[in-house]
Image (spheres, helix red, strand yellow):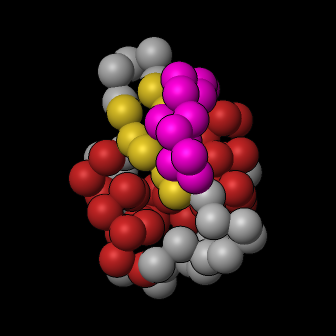
């Protein structure tokens, strides 16, 4: 199993936008993103601070429903 990367909310949003997600709304510091296939996720953006490991793991595995290895490949491409 790959290790979780250290990534900020801003950077995660940039990666998801490249993968076809669109920002549907912003409520304070929370950005709601939706993919055409119906996948939804909410990303907190607090300056350029890294996302907590537990939250990043939840976003990747529960919201995006992909493996850590697949997400790591998204970072490379």
Q: Is residue 61 above or below residue 41?
A: below
Residue 48 appears in the rendering: yes
Residue at (62% x, 76% y) in the render: 50
Q: Is residue 56 left or right of residue 6?
A: left
Q: Is residue 13 above or below residue 24?
A: below
| Location of residue 29 in the rendering, given as x and y in whole percent from the top left corner | 58, 52
When the figure is inspected, residue 51 is found, relative to residue 65, above or below; the finding is: below
Residue at the (34%, 21%) spot, across then down: 38
Q: Residue furthest front?
A: 28
Q: Residue at x 47, y 25 (%)?
A: 35
Q: Position of residue 68 (x, y in %)?
A: 41, 66
| x and y, in percent, of residue 71 in the image | 50, 58
- Count of marks overlaid on the render: 0
Q: Quadrant of residue 8?
A: bottom right
Give the overall secondary structure of the magenta segment: strand
* Closer to us: 9 or 67: 9
Q: In this rendering, is residue 42 above or below 23?
A: below
Q: In the drawing, does residue 66 fall left or right of residue 71?
A: left
Q: Magenta region: which residues? A: 19-32
Task: Tell me if residue 72 is in the magenta stretch.
Answer: no
Q: Nearer the viewer, residue 54 or 66?
A: 54
Can residue 73 be seen from the camera position used here?
no
Residue at 69%, 35% in the rendered image: 18
Which of the image's four quarters has the N terminus?
bottom left
Classify residue 31 by image quadrant: top right
Residue 13 in the image: state x and y as whole percent: 63, 47
Please identify the quarter of the rendering in which residue 2 is found. bottom left
The residue at the far left in this view is: 62
């Amino acid at each position: 199993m790959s290790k979780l990367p250290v990534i900020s909310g801003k950077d995660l949003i940039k990666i998801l936008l490249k993968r076809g997600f669109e920002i549907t709304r912003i409520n304070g510091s929370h950005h709601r993103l939706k993919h055409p296939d119906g996948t939804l996720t909410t990303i907190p953006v607090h300056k350029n601070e890294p996302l907590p490991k537990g939250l990043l793991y939840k976003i990747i595995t529960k919201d995006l429903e992909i493996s850590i290895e697949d997400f790591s490949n998204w970072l490379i491409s």
